[in-house]
Every structure is written in structure tokens, then in C-alpha cells.
């Protein structure tokens, strides 16, 4: 359910940066999207778990996201169509931003 708390909020990086919400389901309806948007502009299933584990281990973490869908009614189709382009965009970013990647 949107708005349910699973763990404490984490402040990582710039405190004025974007808020990333998490959840355990793919958001594909406008009502759920609206409830989440009231709390955060971005939703990601894995980011919170990664940030929590890194925080507890004292390890620095940079999460690089590429938005794959708008979490609305057509999100599942949009995701399927966008995933290959998103993978290419992230690989291009990695080649530019991480010297040892290329």
C-alpha cells in the first residue's frame, strides 16, 4: 500500500536532492501513482534496499537511475519497450563516467 513505511527514511548525498520511494510491486495504475507522487518523484524497487545495506556497512553508494516508465496505466508496456534503450543509456553513461568501465 502506498505510504506504508518499511524502514526509516535515509538521507544520502545532497539533503536537498530528490526523494526516492520504494515498494514491492510494479506501479501500473493512476491511483497508486498519485499516492506515491505525494511522497516522492521517483519510485524504485531496489534502491532503498541497496542504500540501506550500504549505509549499514559504511560503504559509499551511488545509484544511477534511468526512468523506464511513468508508473501509470501503460507502465508495463512502456517498461517492456524502454528497457533495452534504458540499458544502452546506462551503458553509455558508465562508459563516460567510470574510467575503468570502457
Image (cartoon, grey):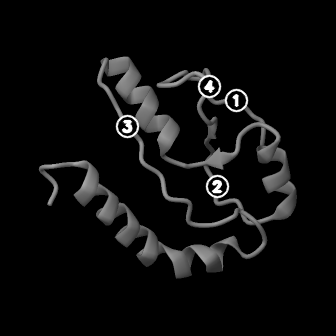
Give how far across and how far down residue 93 sits, in percent.
Answer: 33, 58
Instruction: Provide the secondary structure element on which disc 1 rests.
Output: loop
Spatial separation of the CA atoms under disc 3 and disc 4? 16 Å
Question: Nearer the viewer's eye, disc 4 or disc 1?
Answer: 4
Q: Nearer the viewer, mark 2 or mark 4?
A: 4
State which quadrant residue 74 falls in. bottom right
Position of residue 48 relative to residue 101, above or below, is above
Q: Residue at x 64, y 55 (%)?
A: 25
How far apart are the alpha carbons under marks 2 and 4?
27 Å
Q: Dot 2 corresponds to which residue?
A: 25
Residue position for label 4: 16
Q: Identify the element where label 2 is drawn.
A: loop
- Mark 1, Cα crowd under 10 Å, few <14 / some 14-19 / many 20+, is few
Query: In the visual, does 101 lie left or right of 27?
Result: left
In the rendered structure, find residue 5 and report the number of the disc placed on it. Answer: 1
Q: Residue furthest right?
A: 31
Q: Considering only vertical position in the picture, is 29 above or below 57?
A: below
Of tags 2 and 3, the one toward the viewer is 3
Distance from the alpha carbon under mark 1 to that under mark 2: 14 Å
Marks 3/1: CA distance? 23 Å
Q: Secondary structure at mark 3?
A: loop
Which is nearer the eye, 65 or 45?
A: 65
Q: Give the CA separation, mark 2 to mark 3.
A: 23 Å
Is the C-beta separation of discs 4 and 1 under 8 Å? no
Q: Are marks 3 and 4 in contact (CB under 8 Å)?
A: no
Q: Residue 82 appears at what percent x and percent y?
A: 52, 76
Q: Position of residue 38 (x, y in %)?
A: 82, 40
How many residues crowd around disc 2 within 10 Å: few (fewer than 14), some, or many (20 or more)? few
Q: Which residue is mark 3?
A: 62
* SS for callout 4: loop
Q: Is residue 3 left or right of residue 16?
A: right
Amino acid at each position: 500500500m502506498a505510504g506504508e513505511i518499511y524502514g526509516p527514511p535515509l538521507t544520502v548525498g545532497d539533503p536537498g536532492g530528490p526523494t526516492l520511494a520504494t515498494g514491492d510491486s510494479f506501479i501500473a495504475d493512476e491511483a497508486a501513482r498519485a499516492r506515491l507522487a505525494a511522497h516522492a518523484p521517483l519510485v524504485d524497487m531496489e534502491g532503498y534496499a541497496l542504500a540501506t545495506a550500504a549505509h549499514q556497512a559504511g560503504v559509499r553508494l551511488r545509484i544511477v537511475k534511468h526512468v523506464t516508465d511513468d508508473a501509470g496505466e501503460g507502465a508495463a508496456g512502456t517498461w517492456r519497450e524502454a528497457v533495452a534503450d534504458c540499458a544502452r543509456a546506462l551503458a553509455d553513461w558508465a562508459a563516460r563516467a567510470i574510467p575503468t568501465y570502457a
